[in-house]
Amino acid sequence: MNAMSTYYLSRAALCIGFATLLIISGAELWVGILAGLLTFGWFLLAPRIGRYVVRHEAGVAALHRDERAQAINNAAARNGFVVAMLAAGAVVVHAILRAQSTVPVDVLEWLMLLGIVVYSASDIWMRRRQA
Amino acid sequence: MRCELTYDVSYTLHRVATLNLDNCVRQLRLKQDLTQEALAATVGVTRQTIIAVEKGKFVPSVKLALQLAAALGAPVGKLFWLERKGGAG
């Protein structure tokens, strides 16, 4: 059995475990099976998309980012965090200028969404720039 | 401790700071009939990282540079060098 077969078998076991956990915790049978299949599909795809390398010695956590992917991820996360924090600051300043004593909690969802969008866009842009 | 000075240190600090990192990873890899995928698997990175290193778009860490040098059987100083932008160093 080669190293990749071990990877696929261990991922299949993880996905079966995940699907079983979902079903035991009250999800419908088809939802559990679908979630397990989708997770396994992700594990099949992950070593081929150029973001992860398989380190067999790491066992359950065999998927790792290499140093380029980690550098891109760090920079994208930093961009998302900085933009979200600047936007949060702008919201607070706006509230102060309008003499509001409170800021609606809904704003947090939009700030988080903004951070995720900036993170994703930065990640894609940096990957394309280095390709 | 192996620490030999093999580089030409005639550059001033100011000049060194303006130099770019260049490499001959692609040439050495092709010379050894290695695919990008095989080299990537040998040093434990993705094929995309090898592509980015070969194109000079990603500067590898010292560890990865040493791993590439070991995989290609060349001293790291022959694999990577500093060069003026758009010309020979």
Image: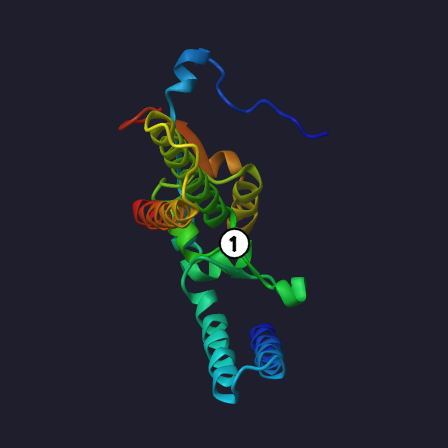
Residue at disc 1, secondary structure: loop
Q: Nearer the viewer, residue B57 or A42?
A: A42
Q: Chain of mark 1?
A: A
**Residue B10 vertical position relative to residue A11 in the rendered view, above or below:** above
Q: Nearer the viewer, residue A43 or A16?
A: A16
Q: Position of residue A26 (x, y in %)?
A: 58, 82
* Tally of numbered tags: 1
Quadrant location of the C terminus of chain B in the rendered image: top left
Furthest residue toward left: B86
What residue is shown at x 56% (from left), y 42% (from top)?
A: B66
Q: Position of residue B85 (x, y in %)?
A: 30, 26
Q: Position of residue B52 (x, y in %)?
A: 38, 47
Furthest residue toward bottom: A29
What residue is shown at x 33% (from left), y 51% (from top)?
A: A124
Q: Pointer 1: residues within 10 angstroms few (<14), some, or many (20+)?
A: some
Residue at mark 1? A65
Q: Nearer the viewer, residue B36 or A43?
A: A43
**Residue A125 vertical position relative to residue B87 in the rendered view, above or below:** below
Q: Position of residue A22 (x, y in %)?
A: 58, 79
What residue is shown at x 62% (from left), y 25% (from top)?
A: B4
